Amino acid sequence: MNGKESLDEPRSTTDPSPDEPPPLLGSWPRLYAAVVAFLALLILLFYWFEKAFTPS
């Protein structure tokens, strides 16, 4: 079989092709930037939360 799919097995329709853009934001770099921005926002929010509720 040479490590390839068997002709008897149906090909999965849920696997996206490697060249397909992500469903959000249209390109992988934009999606990665959005994830990094979201994580930075979470870090800032947790920092603010810690400063606001730390006893003086």
Image (cartoon, rainbow, N blue to C red):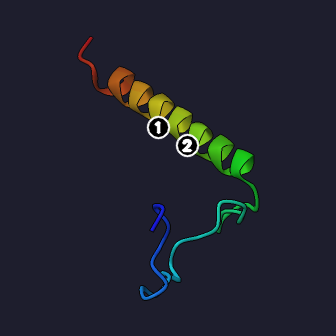
Residue at 51%, 37% (x, y): give it. Answer: 39
- Mark 2: amino acid: Phe
- Position of the C terminus by quadrant: top left
Q: Residue furthest top?
A: 56
Residue at 48%, 62% (x, y): give it. Answer: 2
- Position of the N terminus by quadrant: bottom left
Q: Which residue is mark 1?
A: 42
Q: Nearer the viewer, residue 15 or 52?
A: 15
Q: Position of residue 33 (x, y in %)?
A: 67, 41
Q: Position of residue 5 (x, y in %)?
A: 47, 73
Q: Residue furthest front?
A: 1
Neighbour class for label 1 at 10 Å: few (<14), some, many (≥20)? few
From the viewer's perspective, is residue 56 above or below residue 54?
above
Q: CA distance from mark 2 to mark 1?
A: 6 Å
- Mark 1: amino acid: Leu
Q: Secondary structure at mark 1?
A: helix
Q: Nearer the viewer, residue 16 or 9?
A: 9
Q: Position of residue 26 (x, y in %)?
A: 76, 62
Q: Which residue is mark 2?
A: 38
Left or right, 35 with reference to 7: right
Instruction: Check contact, mark 2 vs mark 1: CB within 8 A.
Output: yes
Image quarter for residue 49? top left
Residue at 55%, 43% (x, y): give it. Answer: 38
